[in-house]
Amino acid sequence: MKHLDPRAPLVLDTRELGRRPGSQRQVSRSVPAPADLGIEVLSVPEGAPVELDLRLEAVMEGVLVTGSAKAGLEGECVRCLEPIRDEIAVTFQELFVYDDIRDAEGAEEDDEVSMLQDDLLDLETVLRDAVVLALPFQPLCQDDCPGLCPECGARLADEPDHTHEAAIDPRWAELTKLEQDPTD
Ligand SMILES: [Zn+2]
Ligand SMILES: [Zn+2]
């Protein structure tokens, strides 16, 4: 496990709760988005503000974090590549278990369990999972985006009447040329 930096924006200090079950703390802060907060085609740009509203509550085995996050999204339509700007609001809840309690129980390392480290917790994974889950797999600029013209790449939403002349069969094209040739 990497060592947590108490000054990192998404690391929260729970010492104030004194490990007394029932003690609570509200935290509201704006943090810069970590890298890769989202999916390839739609994400919160790195460094953009993420508004967090959190409740930290000490329970017997650790600290329960209940919260919400809001942020702006940037990406592109998977059909027509038009830039998309949107907003996302997610909620999450996660129990972070005291690391020394788990050690005392001789529990095996379990990646599924979020752990406190010296009473610090790192919200980054929880936040990322919540954001990724809330995103559409195939972001679109509009629900019925018609995409791009397969022949010339024009964005069809901008040109509803966009068409091409039906392609002429090359054999007929040859005939047309002969007919128009005055020396024949
Ligand atoms: Zn589109
Ligand atoms: Zn076209």
Image (spheres, grey):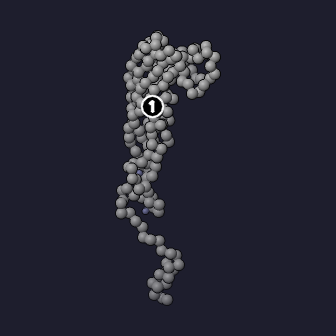
The answer to whether residue 5 is visible is no
Q: Is residue 156 visible?
A: yes
- Residue 17 drawn at (x, y percent): 44, 13
Residue appearing at x 49%, y 22% in the figure: 95
Residue in front for this viewpoint, 177 or 62: 62
Q: Residue at x 39, y 34 (%)?
A: 89
Residue 162, position in %: x, y?
38, 63
> Does residue 120 appear to the left or right of 102 in the view shown?
left
Q: Would residue 103 appear left or right of 58 to someone viewing this image?
A: right
Describe the element under mark 1 as helix, strand or loop.
loop
Q: Residues within 10 Å of mark 1 (few under 14, many from 20)?
A: many
Q: Nearer the viewer, residue 75 or 179?
A: 75
On the image, numbered disc 1 is attached to which residue? 33
Instruction: List x then y, in percent, for residue 72.
Output: 39, 36
Q: Is residue 81 above or below residue 72?
A: below
The x, y position of residue 149, in whole percent, is 44, 60
List the single residue furthest toward the bottom: 184
**On screen, residue 82 above or below 58:** below
Could you tell me which residue is drawn at 45 percent across and 26 percent down? 93
For this rendering, which residue is in front, 39 or 58?
A: 58
The answer to whether mark 1 is within 8 Å of ligand 1 is: no
Q: Where, quadrant-wise, is the N terminus in this rendering? A: top right
Quadrant in the picture for residue 44? top left
Using the rendered view, name the quadrant where residue 135 is placed. Answer: top left
Disc 1 marks a residue whose amino acid type is Ala
Q: Residue at x 46, y 13 (%)?
A: 21
Question: Disc count in the image?
Answer: 1
Which quadrant of the picture is home to ligand 2?
Answer: bottom left
